[in-house]
Amino acid sequence: MPLPPRGTVIKASEAPFQPLEQASGRLVSILGYGNQGRAHALNLRDSGAAVLVGGRPGSDARARAEAEGFETFDLEDAARKADLVVIALPDEVHGPVWTSTLASVIRPGQVLGVVHGFSLHHGDIDPPDGVGAVLVAPKGPGRTVRERYLMGQGIPAIIAVHREIEMPATEDAPATDATDLALAWATGLGCTRGGSIVGSVADETETDLFGEQAVLCGGMTALFLAAFEILVEAGYPPEIAYIECCHEAKQIGDLVYNRGIEGMRAAISNTAEFGIDHAGPRLVDEKTRATMRALLQEIRDGGFAERLRRDARDGFRDLHAHRDAQRDHPIEAAGETVRNLMPWLAEEDARLQAPGPDTADEGGNGATPG
């Protein structure tokens, strides 16, 4: 059964988990146990799916998966065994791994799943005839996907079916299709508890990359650095510049996250709100909008994807150079001083990043998928 039109909200009642329940006899392989892979594996297992993990021999991620109770296999063996094969590896390795390892073992009747549409959209993965391809892309990092699941909540995902296939009935399960597996996957993650949104692979890929570049990572980082540098040049203490132009961004971000822009405006001072309309249009003028449109066009025509692939083939020389430059920027020393005033921040982060079973894994609201 096809998905409803793009933009439709899907609730758990419209996305039953039965096609992936252990009683169905179907198996899910999660290839990769990093940021997203771990959350997908744990949530699906807790929801009642049979899950195994694929990884590189001897890798730390594979060892962690084993420590957390998963049976693990090399990537090709994990892919060969499963009905739903979820590729949760970094975007830049999808193409090489597909060509060298997966293309020869994926068979008709299986469904490939991705957590970000980059490789399907740009042709790094080209499933053969008879192989389904679906996308379930939670709109948040894996840590949040897991935390919200354990709280009995969930975060929205974009759901897309790139290629539909019919899956015949087995001794243990009725006939189904790639759409039903995608919906069950989203429900098993907890992403339909509040609701997820139907889109296409292009919708998810292009909007995700544009949001990262124009706002969430590229735009915000550039604003942080420029504002910090201007205040320090004007003679203000670096630590105060950091607090005002970087540290407090989380507080405003949390207001927008929880209440929307209108709600954020209602929560801040009149002075701060007046500044939105005084400064915002001058910072984001027609020249800025033209640059943003150019970024979007580079994403849509594949120019950005090709630059990413080229740097990956070169060992990420450009990316590493920029990382090194950021490490030496004065904002880092100022930020460390400010964060040291609040040692609980590091303690909380260490607790959230610590390996081992989740504190809520022995029960609670995470045990049911819907």
Image (cartoon, rainbow, N blue to C red):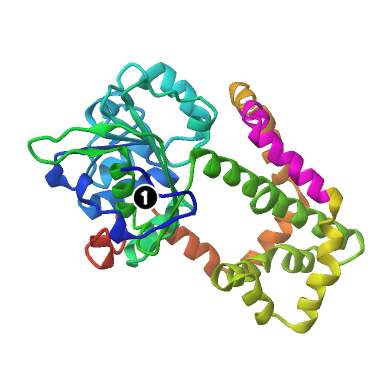
The residue to which callout 1 is attached is 39
**Which residue is situated farthest in the bottom direction here?**
270
Q: Residue at x 36, y 65 (%)?
A: 153
Q: Residue at x 35, y 21 (%)?
A: 129
The reply to whether the magenta stretch includes residue 250 is no
| Percent of width and height locating residue 201 | 49, 39
The disc labelled 1 sits on which kind of residue? Answer: Ala
Q: Is residue 114 above or below residue 151?
A: above
Q: What SS does tag 1 mark?
A: helix
Q: Nearer the viewer, residue 72 or 156?
A: 156
The quarter of the picture where the C terminus appears is: bottom left
| Percent of width and height locating residue 303 | 68, 29
The quarter of the picture where the N terminus appears is: top left
- The region drawn magenta spans 288-308
**Which residue is situated farthest in the left direction here?**
171
Q: For residue 102, which quarter of the picture?
A: top left
- Can I make out residue 250 in this image? yes
| Percent of width and height locating residue 21 | 18, 48
